[in-house]
Image (cartoon, rainbow, N blue to C red):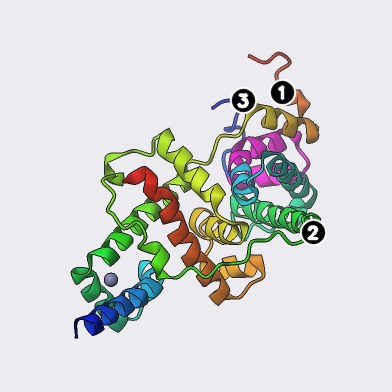
Amino acid sequence: MISQHQHRHENDCQEVLSHLNDYIDGELSPELCMELEAHLAVCQDCRVVFDTLSKTLYLVHKLRESPPELPETVEYRLFAVMNLEQFVPKKRK
Amino acid sequence: MTGIEIDLDIYPDEASLVEALKSGDPEACACMIKQYAPRVYAIAIRMLNDPDDAEEVLQETFISACKNIKKFEERSALGTWLHRIATNAALMHLRKRKRREVSLDEPIETQGGDDVYREVQDWTFSPDDHAMNSEIRDILEKAIAELPETLRTVFVLREIEGYSTEETAQILGISVSAAKVRLHRARLRLRQLLSPYFT
Ligand SMILES: [Zn+2]
């Protein structure tokens, strides 16, 4: 009986995991949403995965606002390739 | 602003910048590059994970943009148009690279739930407490770079460039369901890659 219960629980976790992305993207049907939320309320493992996944995406979306720096040498070469050397200062710094 | 100094206020709005670009004004070209090169380079470096290839894509993007500016119909923003050119150029590089390396392309391993729970512990780290400091940035960029290419391209287009799942699928020439599967795996993988830093 216990093992059966355990097994069932794991199946639920697999199912929740497979729907997690649709849930995050707001593409899950209301019924499945309710089921998923009910599971998250009682299953700490899944809740942790959900929380950390949300945090990960939160941070990733922040990258959007701050692109990695364009190295100065790359910028100089780009201006050279584009025949825009007139805009490049003769002496750097 | 670092690097080459260009007065970005010469053109009061995008329409006048585009008009000047279409008339072949080099100052407009310099202006466009100053304004958009960082974003274009960002797409390229994240997609390709290689500074030399990224620089080539950067140059190709602006060469192509200047050559084709007359075809730009202003139905979208200039930035969006440039992103699309950059994305296509980056994909061309990936295909070239693939041909070069025959088939080192990593098969998409079936990653079930077991893996995900291997190290289930909550993160003490709370993103709200931290501004996007450079340490977190570096960790994130490194983790994204570590994603296998098939996952990384979908992830970058969808999560960083902000394309929809449908657009991402279309750009990559894969089905929407394939894009969803890859995105799902990429997200979980990234979460896993970040776990050691945030526990
Ligand atoms: Zn669970």
User: How far apart are the two marked residues, 3 and 1, measured between alpha carbons?
Assistant: 9 Å
Q: Residues within 10 Å of mark 3 (few under 14, many from 20)?
A: some
Give the quarter the ligand 1 occupies: bottom left
Residue B153 at x, y = what percent? 60, 58
Whether residue B84 is in magenta: the answer is no
**CB within 8 Å, label 2 to label 3:** no
User: Looking at the image, which residue is at 42% across and 55% down?
Assistant: B192
Which range is magenta?
A: B14-39
User: How far apart are the two marked residues, 2 and 3, measured between alpha carbons?
Assistant: 36 Å
Residue B145 at x, y = what percent? 56, 48
The residue beneath circle 2 is B99
Front of the two marks 2 and 3: 2
Q: Is residue A61 left or right of residue B88?
A: left
Q: Residues within 10 Å of mark 1 (few under 14, many from 20)?
A: some
Nearer the observer, A20 or B16: A20
Residue B18 at x, y = what percent? 67, 46
- Pointer 3 chain: B
Nearer the observer, B118 or A1: A1
Which amino acid type is shown beneath numbered disc 3? Gly
